[in-house]
Image: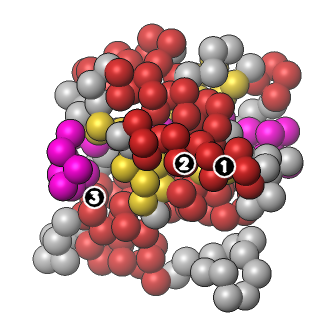
Amino acid sequence: MRLTERLTGHHGALLVVDVQEKLMARIKYRDLVVANAVRLVRAAEILKLPFLATEQYPEGLGPTVAELAALIPDRHSKTTFHCCAVPQFLEQLYGHHIKHVTLVGIEAHVCVAQTALELLKLGFAVQVPADAVASRTTMDWKFALRRLEAAGVVLTTTEAILFEWTERSDRPEFKAISALVKSFQQPGLPQGEH
């Protein structure tokens, strides 16, 4: 992927990685990550992009948080940290002729990072919205993003992705995407950190 390439909705997919309640209980910006993941899933629905979700060892870590489980009823369980070991995941990417994947979820330095690196190795372009991934510690989150950017992952934000996926203000879906942007109340951040 060229650094100047836009990752529009064409040939793109969204993967929600391990946003499970037991894990999320330890994430400082839980509400922000969940809210942005929900916005991206809703946008993927509107724009007809494939979206998938995984759960890391759900027998021990529990199910996906309710807000996302309601939107993504079929989730793939895994015990490997990266998602590319899940056969159905890769089958869906190849079956839909996906060229780039947007990753959201937790933890940034473990499952998200390892999935991003595997996807890059397989030839996919990858983008990660920094406001829709997290780790238990800020240091792990920061260094995960630094490592991913150095490896070739595009770091961005949820709102930037919404508009890049949409591409144009004169397409029929734009009004619904715009509503996702305008109605968003950013949770979990102290005043002045928006």
**Circle 3 SS class:** helix
The residue under label 2 is: 145
Is residue 181 depicted above or below 109 in this figure?
below
**Residue in the picture at 19% in, 77% down:** 169
Dominant SS in magenta: loop
Q: Which of the two residues, 139 or 189, is positioned nearer the viewer here? A: 139
- Disc nearer the start of the sequence (3/1): 1
Give the residues drawn in magenta, as a range. Answer: 1-25
State how far apart marks 1 and 2 are (Cα): 6 Å
Q: Mark 3 points at which residue?
A: 165
In the image, 60: left or right of 108? right
- Residue 99, percent from left and from top: 23, 34
Q: Please give the label number shown on residue 89.
A: none
Tell me where residue 187 appears, x and y as whole percent: 70, 73
Q: Can residue 115 be seen in this view?
A: yes
Q: Give the foreground label among 3 and 1.
A: 1
Q: Answer yes or no: do the residues labelled 3 and 1 have beta carbons within 8 Å?
A: no
Q: Residue at left 44%, top 77%?
A: 181
In the picture as drawn, the residue positioned furthest to the bottom comes out as: 192
Please determine whether, in this image, residue 75 is positioned above or below residue 139.
above
Mark 1 sits on what residue? 141
Query: What is the secondary structure assignment of the residue under circle 2?
Result: helix
Label 3: few (<14), some or many (≥20) within 10 Å? Answer: many
- The x and y percentages for residue 140 are 70, 45
Nearest to N terminus: mark 3 or mark 2: 2
